[in-house]
Amino acid sequence: MSGSRPSTVEEKRRAVLQLRLRRMREELGAGRSQDTQATVSPLVPLRPAGTRPPLFLVHAVGGSVAPYVGLAGLLGDDQPVYALEDPGLQGDAVQARGLPAIAAAYLAAVREVQPDGPLHLGGWSGGGAIALEMARQDDDVAVVLVIDTAFPAEPIYPDDDQLRTWFAADMAGMGAELGEAEWAKRFPVFAANVRAFLGHRPSPVDARVVLLCTEDSEPEYLDRWRALCDDVHVVPGNHYTMFQSPHIEALAEALRDRLSEVSVR
């Protein structure tokens, strides 16, 4: 982010969330020994307390879990929430790997927190595809909450110029202004995740799959999901504003309702 002072309510909200996430990372890092820091865990405990089954939310293609910080606080005091952040943002080497390999690594981290019992998974944008693949690899998943994930009809293999254009648009959509150092750190993570996402074809899974899409979703996008999901729920806002007030409250309510439906089944 730029060094200018936040001037709008939304900018101030983002600054507070980023500060909260930074403190969470520092606390998590302080609890690791030097040996364990050689490989950064993708898990970020946003709200670890609670008696309900934990919800694990996978990062979008940008790799950061910052959008989930505010959301976690709206899901209820009794709902534990963990996020999965791309380790490349925390100093690990950025690797070119397929989406199934990413899902396998994240599934192993999730099962360290919850070794037994059905998982509750979710993810925004490309994170929804990773969560779905995690469910395909694990035979005990109760629900996958896919948040506005649009996958192409056929695999796409973008070049570096296309990826830079998409990255700039993605950062603008989230209101982020990156300096050269932040761009150099974040772009390789974005590029690797986009290539993994666009080269992957999702498969049906043995779990309840719920698509939470925005009001401006294209019919073709929804048609491709009909063979993969059990329910489609429309939430207000667009791909980015759905995580901003007042739309984030509606998104949180939809997630709470879907999780409650799973718990009574």
Image (cartoon, helix red, strand yellow):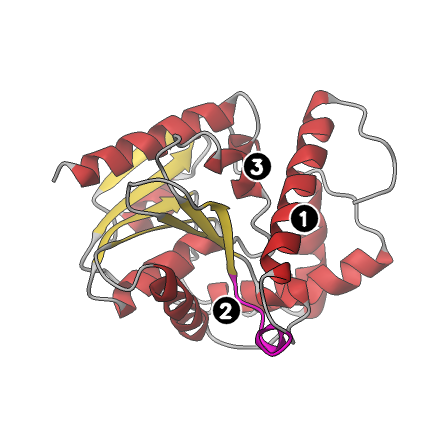
- Spatial CA distance of label 1 from label 3 is 21 Å
Horizontal and vertical percent position of residue 128: 41, 52
- In front of the other: label 1 or label 3? 1
Is the residue 178 above or below the residue 101 in the image? above
Of the residues under marks 1 and 2, which one precedes in the sequence? 1
Q: Is residue 214 left or right of residue 135?
A: right
**Residue picked out by circle 3:** 240
Residue drawn 20% across the image and 35% down it:
261
Residue 156's tag is none
- Spatial CA distance of label 1 from label 2 is 27 Å
Of the residues under marks 1 and 3, which one precedes in the sequence? 1
Is residue 153 visible in this depiction of the protein? Answer: no
**Residue picked out by circle 2:** 196
Q: Quadrant of the N terminus?
A: top right
Mark 3: give few (<14), some (14-19) or many (20+) Cα within 10 Å.
Answer: some
**Residue picked out by circle 1:** 22
Name the kind of residue labelled 2 in the image. Ala
Decide which of 217, 181 is in the foreground and name it: 181
Name the kind of residue labelled 1 in the image. Arg
Horizontal and vertical percent position of residue 57: 43, 50
Horizontal and vertical percent position of residue 32: 58, 67
Q: The magenta stretch spans which residues?
A: 34-42
Which element is circle 3 on? loop
Which element is circle 2 on? helix
Of the residues under marks 3 and 2, which one precedes in the sequence? 2
